[in-house]
Amino acid sequence: MIKKDSVVSLSYILKNENGEELDRFESATPLAYMHGHGQIVPGLENVLEGLAIGDKKEVIVTPQEGYGEVQPQLKMKVSRDKFPADRKIEPGMQFSSKMEDGREIPFTVQAIEGDDVLLDGNHPLAGETLHFSVEVVEVRPATAEELQHGHVHGAGGHHH
């Protein structure tokens, strides 16, 4: 049964409000995470509590319980000369920037307009209502090492 500090392996299909598939993990190569450690969106993690191997669930996650609402202040126009001159900048590129509050935010280059680079620091799924079709593939207690490191080791998880 899924509870805090369980290592959970899930197969799922993720779709948006329009029914377009956004992501998929098959049961042969499931997503592994440590339950209760904020490694998946809260709206999904909360409803998985108490489920067992073989359980299936349809879950709708609001933006507030998913990747948040779109934050307009994370969309910005930056002069091209703020980037290294020898670096080619293209739409889709990602980089991190330290914000005034100390947080590292990943930004994606949306477009280049003349001498300006349009950036977006919102998660690509911010503002989206997410529709998950989930099946619990495996549940086991986390090892002491996994708990110490804060992530899953082995199949579907982190490898050292």
Image (tube, helix red, strand yellow):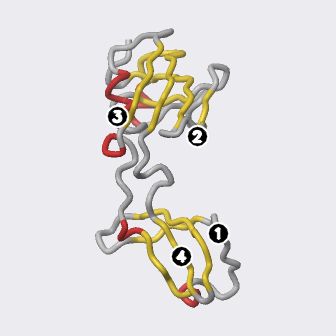
Relative image position of residue 116 (x, y in whole percent): 56, 85
64, 140: nearer the viewer: 64
What is the spatial separation of the Cα atoms under label 1 and label 4, in whole angstroms? 9 Å
Q: In which quarter of the image is residue 43?
A: top left
Determine the secondary structure under disc 1: loop
Q: Which percent across, then down, holds residue 11?
A: 56, 23
Q: Answer few, some or many: residues within 10 Å of disc 1's Cα (few below 14, many 20 plus, some between 14 and 19).
A: few
Query: Going from the N terminus, do you reach mark 2 or mark 3 first?
Result: 2
| Contact check, label 4 and label 2, Cβ < 8 Å | no
Neighbor class of circle 2 (other Cα within 10 Å; few <14, some 14-19, many 20+) is few
Q: What residue type is labelled 4?
A: Leu
| Amino acid of disc 3 | Gly
Q: Name the residue under label 3.
A: 43
Residue under label 2: 22
The reply, left or right, for residue 40 in relation to residue 81 is left
Using the rendered image of the protein, determine whether residue 95 is visible from the camera's viewpoint: yes
Q: How far apart are marks 4 and 2 (CA)?
A: 24 Å
- Mark 4 crowd level (few <14, some 14–19, many ≥20, 10 Å Cα): some
- Residue at numbered disc 1: 91
From the viewer's perspective, is residue 125 above or below residue 38? Answer: below
Q: What element carries label 2?
A: strand
Q: Are marks 2 and 3 in contact (CB under 8 Å)?
A: no
The residue that appears at 54% across and 16% down in the rendered structure is 137
In the image, what residue type sits under mark 1? Pro
Q: Mark 3 touching mark 4, by CB under 8 A?
A: no
Q: Mark 4 points at which residue?
A: 118
Where is residue 78 shown, x and y percent of the image?
50, 83
Q: Is mark 4 on a helix, strand or loop?
A: strand
Q: Which of marks 3 and 1 is nearer the N terminus?
A: 3
Q: Which of 123 and 88 is in front in this view?
A: 123
State which tag comes first along the sequence, 3 or 4. 3
